[in-house]
Amino acid sequence: MTTTTPAPALRDLDNSAQVLERAKTENLISPRFYTTDYAAMDRIDVGSLRAEWDAMLAEYEGDNNHDHFKRDDSFAAEIRELPPELRKEFLDFLVTSITSEFSGCVLYNEIRKRVDNPDIKQLMTYLTRDESRHANFINQSLKDYGLAVDLQALKASKAYTYFKPKYIFYATYLSEKIGYARYITIYRQLERHPELRFHPIFRWFERWCNDEFRHGESFALIMRAHPELLRGANLLWVRFFLLAVYATMFVRDHTRPALHRAMGLEPDEFDYRVFDITTEISKQVFPVSLDTDAPAFRAGLDRLVQARVAFDAGAARGGLAGRWQQARAALRGAATFVRLYLHPVRRHDLPAQIRVAPSW
């Protein structure tokens, strides 16, 4: 079990300058900012799914969360001082979350500004609205601790990664759906055990995660409208992004043992529950899924965590010996990822009904 492996040490976040530097961090498990081929985005055609598309846009226009991202009077009353390790991991969770939400906001807004396609422009307007609300709501919780992410400085200074539109579709669909699965699993746990809810932000997760779910539905419709994205050589990319998103989450969660312990969640059980939900949802659009129940697959994820721990230990060690330790850990991690990628996948037919209800 990877829970017996010491987690990499997280840096204390004592001021907003350090928070900004943490948000700008670039590594294999940190959220990234993206740019894409805007002309190709402009050429997207969802006409074959017009009825489903228009129904989805009507849901966005209805904006059933327009009043949700506001703090009520009890919010401040629930904030309390946290033990040092929990505080460190919770703040890192907030910074990572705000970076991920704002990444989506920046990308969607750039697409909105650069396309004329009315379907895509309207969708991106709604997505930008939602992600902006999420990022600013998280920032308010950071301010309770005397911290905040300067979002405009982050936008101007963080490195951007170019992704083809199809990579955006695969990665964003999965990140939105796994975000839903994470938030609803945490919410249900704390609904059962309110005594473990150490911060009020978790009370917002149920309606919040429905935004994430709907965002994923949007990209599911785009991909189903372009079936060439879901067959042939593109299935190799589907497999890659499935593994990359799952592995990133698994490794990141195992760096935050105090956070999960405080919520009464064991990282392995939590992650595999989230994988199960995400896999079931993703059958709406992906004809392949990862066999996350296979012992060999789970052992590979454990080895990725161990490689990450060794890599961070090398960074802390410094010098030539530390760099050598990092290089060895990186090679072990890369080799493990390749073996996981080659692990047999499950195959299934795509359903006639594309949309899925958030019923977990």
Image (cartoon, helix red, strand yellow):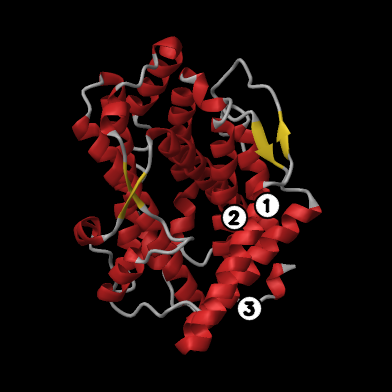
Q: Which residue is mark 1?
A: 340
Hey, what amino acid is under mark 1? Leu
Earlier in the chain: of badge 2 and badge 1, it is 2
Q: Which residue is mark 2?
A: 247
Q: Quadrant of residue 142?
A: bottom left
Residue extending furthest right?
Answer: 295
Residue, x 30% and y 35% (percent of image)? 37
Q: Which residue is mark 3?
A: 6
Q: Secondary structure at mark 3?
A: loop
The residue lying toward the viewer, choosing from 83 and 16, is: 16
Hey, what amino acid is under mark 2? Ala
Q: Residue 116: x, y in percent?
A: 21, 23
Q: Residue 273: x, y in percent?
A: 68, 49
Real-space Cα distance between discs 1 and 3?
A: 23 Å
Label 1 CA crowd tier, 10 Å (few <14, some 14–19, many 20+): many
Q: Residue 15: x, y in percent?
A: 28, 77
Q: Secondary structure at mark 2?
A: helix
